[in-house]
Amino acid sequence: MNNIIVWGATGQSIVLEEIISDMGLNIVAFFDRNKEVKSPIDNIKIFYDESELTKMDKTYFVVAIGGANGRDRVSISEKLLNFGFKSISIISKYAYVSKSSKIMDCVQILPNAAIMPRVVIGKYSIINTSASVDHECVIGKGVHIAPNATLCGCIEVGDYSFIGAGATILPRIKIGKNVIIGSGSVVTKNIEDNKIFYGVPATEQNRTEQNRTEQNRTEQNRT
């Protein structure tokens, strides 16, 4: 059985635990910068100091940081690769992934997700529970498609963007980099970089307050 470390010890790590086990991988340690976070699995250690990484065997790794935190997920993953740890994609046996789709390194695909033909999923992206990515979509790196979101055909999603739970993106839409789409929204037009959209149909929102919220939420995990 191959070993794996998990960076992040809250919700996303709990979601991934059974999938990791089903893949025949053995979690040997958790890492988290927030010292108030406890290990989500009894008898498996959690570390808060990166210096511990230099003492460990160079196993596989997964960065269990979800939400609109794609930049953090990418930067931490690249740091672990530089430490000599090995990349792996975590893909549920209950997900559908078309043989003609292209899945890059360090992707997470959760149960009941559907990746249809000729889709490209970029590095370090998350396709969450029951999300649907239809034919010929191109997903950038560090993207998170939240549970039950629907991406119709021929959609492009830029790096680090977040598509909220239950959102629907209509066909042939282009979504820029670092975009946030609110839960339940319906996107009917192209969206430029660094925008927040939500509603039915989705309209642009003020990003200033959202930036403060993101910064507070991710401060402990930034590199």
Image (cartoon, rainbow, N blue to C red):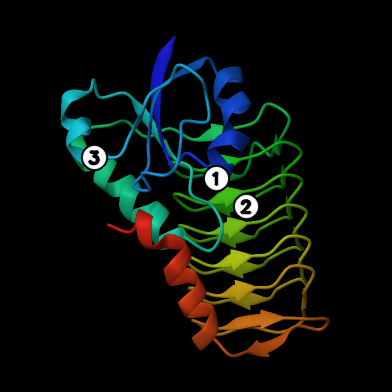
Quote the CA–CA distance across marks 2 and 1: 6 Å
Closer to the camera in the image, 31 or 94: 31
Q: Position of residue 152 (x, y in %)?
A: 77, 63
Confirm or deny contact between disc 2 and disc 1 (CB under 8 A): yes
Residue where numbered disc 3 is placed: 49
Quote the CA–CA distance across marks 3 and 1: 35 Å
Q: Earlier in the sequence, mark 2 or mark 1?
A: 1
Q: Earlier in the sequence, mark 2 or mark 3?
A: 3
Number of the front mark, 2 or 3 = 3
> At 61% across and 45% down in the image, what residue appears?
101
> At 21% across and 31% down in the image, what residue appears?
52
Q: Position of residue 64 (x, y in %)?
A: 48, 43
Number of the front mark, 3 or 1 = 3
Residue where numbered disc 2 is placed: 119
Q: Amino acid at mark 1?
A: Lys
> At 49% across and 53% down in the image, what residue appears?
122
Closer to the camera in the image, 120 or 158: 158
Q: Secondary structure at mark 3?
A: loop
Where is the C terminus found, in terms of image quarters?
Answer: bottom left
Residue where numbered disc 1 is placed: 102
User: What crowding class fits label 3: few (fewer than 14 Cα within 10 Å), some (14-19), or many (20 or more)?
Assistant: few
Residue 179: quadrant of the picture: bottom right
Closer to the camera in the image, 55 or 188: 55
Q: Is residue 91 left or right of residue 5?
A: right
Q: Amino acid at mark 2?
A: Val
